[in-house]
Amino acid sequence: MIPSNINELNQLLQESYPSLSKKMKLIAFYIVDQPQNLAINTLAVIADDIGVYPSTLVRFAKHFGFSGFAQLQSLFKVRIAQSTINYQQRITDVKKITGSESDTDSSNIFYDVTRRNVEATQLLAENIDIDLMEESVLALCGATEVIICGTNRAQPVANYFYYMLNNLGMRCRIVNDPSEVDNLSNWLDEQTVFIAITYNPYNENTTQAVKIAKQSNSKVILLTDTELNPIAHLADYLFSIHEAEIHTFRSLGATMCLVQAICISIGYHQQGN
């Protein structure tokens, strides 16, 4: 059956991702990671962004049952038409900010960073599953221990999560070293919540830790960049966050907002609110 909306398409892409060819995987990742650009750009522009031929996009769409790429793209155009946010104007504004490669003085970089982070945070606010967030908060409140894993670019998020939960009086620890991951099963059970933060390219230690947590019947909260993360299906609470990209650097602003919201919500639950 042909996907009738974006959620169904993303689910299909997630299930099919491991068996796709390299170029098909690039297209699938772009569809999930850049839905706004997919909706407003032409076939040629999208193909150029991904680095494939336009005909490859057409074959990709037909592979998933669409008559052509235009039919697949129409799902995203409908989404924008139903939104109160003018995505096309948003993207146009962002492109204007970085239109000149020579604008690299500190003031322009600062404006670029702040503007793009605002855009990413607004996108998160529009797409967050509030019920899922509330369920994750309740799971954390009921946990006997919280174990957090996040390395490399994800490490600041892991550290901030630990800082907030520790100040809320919750028993928690960070597990990042390979030796700690090997012993992880000793600390996990059905009353433990495991939080993983990982972005493409996905850290092998974090991937392995999530698998161990799942095998130990712990609840898994996963913060990542796309539903196409190979371990996304293992998460009990999956948060896909599309961060801003500024001068080839990925931000963490939207993720930090989510973490702060979760922790503040825990604080209120602890007070019986």
Image: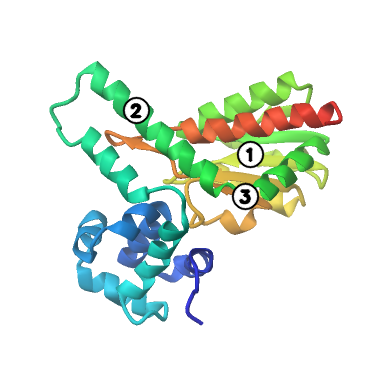
Q: Which residue is mark 3?
A: 129
Is 67 situated left or right of 98 in this image? right
State how far apart marks 3 and 1 are (Cα). Answer: 30 Å
- Residue plotted at (78% across, 34% down): 145
Label number found at residue 181: 1
Q: Which residue is mark 2?
A: 113
Q: Earlier in the sequence, mark 2 or mark 3?
A: 2
Q: Quadrant of residue 77?
A: bottom left
State how far apart marks 1 and 2 are (Cα). Answer: 35 Å
Which amino acid, by three-letter code, is at mark 1?
A: Val
Q: Nearer the viewer, mark 1 or mark 2?
A: 2
Question: The C terminus appears in which quarter of the rendering?
Answer: top right
Q: Position of residue 60 (x, y in %)?
A: 33, 73
Q: Is residue 153 placed above or below 83 in the rendered structure?
A: above
- Residue plotted at (27% across, 24% down): 109
Q: Earlier in the sequence, mark 3 or mark 1?
A: 3
Which amino acid, by three-letter code, is at mark 2?
A: Val
Label 3 neighbourhood size at 10 Å, few (<14), some (14-19), many (20+)? few
Q: Is residue 9 placed above or below 117 in the rendered structure?
A: below
- Residue plotted at (47% across, 31% down): 253
Which amino acid, by three-letter code, is at mark 3?
A: Asp
Query: Who is closer to the viewer here, 57 or 20?
Result: 57
- Helix, strand or loop for disc 3: loop
- Helix, strand or loop for disc 1: helix
- Helix, strand or loop for disc 2: helix
